[in-house]
Image (cartoon, rainbow, N blue to C red):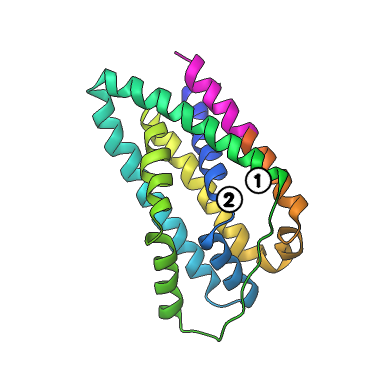
Amino acid sequence: MNAIWQSYLNGLLVAAGLIMAIGAQNAFVLAQSLRREHHLPVAALCIACDVLLVSVGVFGLAALLASNPLLLEITRWGGAAFLLWYGTLALRRAARPQSLHGTEAQPRSRRAVLLAALAVTLLNPHVYLDTVVLIGTLGAQQPEPGAYTLGAASASTLWFLMLALGGAWLAPWLARPLTWRLIDLGVAMMMFAIAAQLVFSR
């Protein structure tokens, strides 16, 4: 596998593992999809925010790390430690899975819905930890940071479009704890595999 595809797949898998966890943003997008209320603009907004934040993290940190080998080693081992920790959390979630449900509410204007989506996305401190710091730090160490960023953007695009376009169809499956058990097991395997690659590839 060449460096471009390796970086692309790493970005795809890391971002997928992070964004698929149950959270307020996913619940919000699914709820809008179930009600068919401005669900496509909401998905597009979430994707745009992810791409922007990941790009800032990857390319901002890439320049910094390239000029500081010690910092590169620190982020390398820190990234591997995070992936192992996150994979372990996914295994723990798999042992006691939850479900994802939409919520009922009165119809709202597009502006109100998009403002709510921005709040759910940008007022959550974890979004910066996930996109700028974690995905960005790992991406800055890739042989092809641009391909990694494209992979992360692909994961975000596929996930949010799936929730927005297939929310009503997916709802019965997403409401089943077994579905999230299987997703979390897959996430754990992805994280452990990329952590091993990060540690042993140099």
To which residue does mark 2 refer? 21
Q: What residue sits 61% from the left and 61% below the top? A: 163
Q: Is residue 96 above or below residue 68?
A: below
Q: Quadrant of the N terminus?
A: top right
Q: Are marks 2 and 1 in contact (CB under 8 Å)?
A: yes
Measured in 3D between alpha carbons, the distance from the residue under mark 2 to the one under mark 1, in whole angstroms, is 10 Å
Q: What kind of residue is marked 2?
A: Ala
Q: Which residue is mark 1?
A: 93
x, y (%) of residue 14? Answer: 52, 38
Q: Quadrant of residue 148?
A: top left
Q: Mark 1 packing: few (<14 Cα in 10 Å), some, or many (20+)?
A: some
Residue 102, located in which quarter of the rendered image? bottom right
Secondary element type, mark 1? helix
- Residue that protrudes farthest toward the left in the picture: 67
| Position in image of residue 2 (x %, y %) | 51, 21
Camera-nearest residue between 177 and 110: 177
Q: Which residues are magenta?
A: 189-202
Judge whether residue 190 is colored magenta.
Answer: yes
Query: Do we see residue 37 in this rendering?
Result: yes
Q: How many marks?
A: 2
Look at label 1 and name its amino acid.
Arg
Quadrant housing residue 99:
bottom right
Does the magenta run of residues contain 60? no
For the point 60% across and 71% down, the residue is: 31
Residue 112 percent coordinates (x, y): 42, 80
